[in-house]
Image (cartoon, helix red, strand yellow):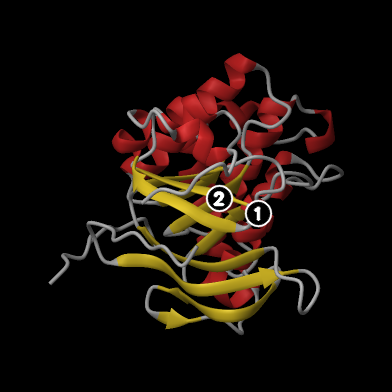
Amino acid sequence: MVPTLQVDVSDGGKSVQCDVAPAISLAGVDAGYVVGLPIIQDVSLEFAQGEIAAIIGTNGAGKSTLAKAIVGLIATFAGRVEVFGVDVTKLGPSDRTKLGLGYVPQVRDVFGGMTVDENLKMGGYLLPPPQVRERVAATLEMFPRLRSLRGRRAETLSGGERKMVAVARALVAAPRVLVVDEPTAGLSPHVGQHVLEEVLPQLSSLGVGVIVIEQRVREVLAVADRCHVLAGGSLVMSSTGAEARQNDNLGALILGAQQSK
């Protein structure tokens, strides 16, 4: 029997087996934006709570489509999506959020006209007000820099500060798994490095599963427990992060020139 990771976080057709019971499971998933024209095809994957899983590939490989299929923002045409053992294939984002799934999109990740404090509170829109206050306070412990920014509108912040707000807002809902799409997009190398090397591992250390889509392959693989490569909408490789770092053919796989056996 596969052991289950017990964590309290405060209130191609190829597949890879996690070392712990899967938090998110995709089986033979086709998904896209127009019925009959799937962007990702026959994708089977498992993601564990408490691990960092990197999704890598070229532009147009289907990475963001995969993220949206996981969180329920686009239709699944075939296959099955489960969140902690619950079939959510036909359920929308709100229902998946209630099961412990969070999402930080690549763009439009903050409400620009709202203050930082208002953005954080929006993250708890499904929670009762007392719990929202508790969760905001707990999140600010993780991101103390945001305390001095609580009264500022998000549109006045730097790129790194906005990304911090976006991640913090998602954490207010106390997700057990967080899908993060291109967290370093538009950030300086220094700030992007901070997000990948410090923020994501901190989430993982708290037992939050992190599914991260990232173009900075070398940097994200340095912290990834798992690596999944998409090419042309298909899964061409799944491995541990360590195996991916040592794979001399990784560049060819990313470009879709060959498929891992």
Q: Residues within 10 Å of mark 2 (few under 14, many from 20)?
A: many
Tell me where residue 246 appears, x and y as whole percent: 32, 28
Task: Give the residue type at disc 1.
Answer: Gly
Q: Is residue 84 at least partly visible in the picture? A: yes
| Residue designated by label 2 | 230
Q: Which element is circle 2 on?
A: strand
Q: Position of residue 133 (x, y in %)?
A: 55, 54
Image height check: is 98 above or below 215?
below
Q: CA distance from mark 1 to mark 2?
A: 7 Å
Of labels 1 and 2, earlier in sequence is 1
Q: Indicate the quadrant where residue 82 lies.
A: bottom left
Q: Residue at the spot x=30%, y=37% of the render?
A: 243
Residue 99 position in % (x across, y down): 47, 73
Q: Are marks 1 and 2 in contact (CB under 8 Å)?
A: yes
Q: Horizontally, is 212 left or right of 223 in the view?
A: right
The residue located at (61%, 31%) in the rendering is: 146
Viewer-proximal residue, 193 or 229?
Answer: 229
Is 210 placed above or below 35 here? above
Q: Is residue 117 left or right of residue 238?
A: right
In the image, what residue type sits under mark 2? Leu
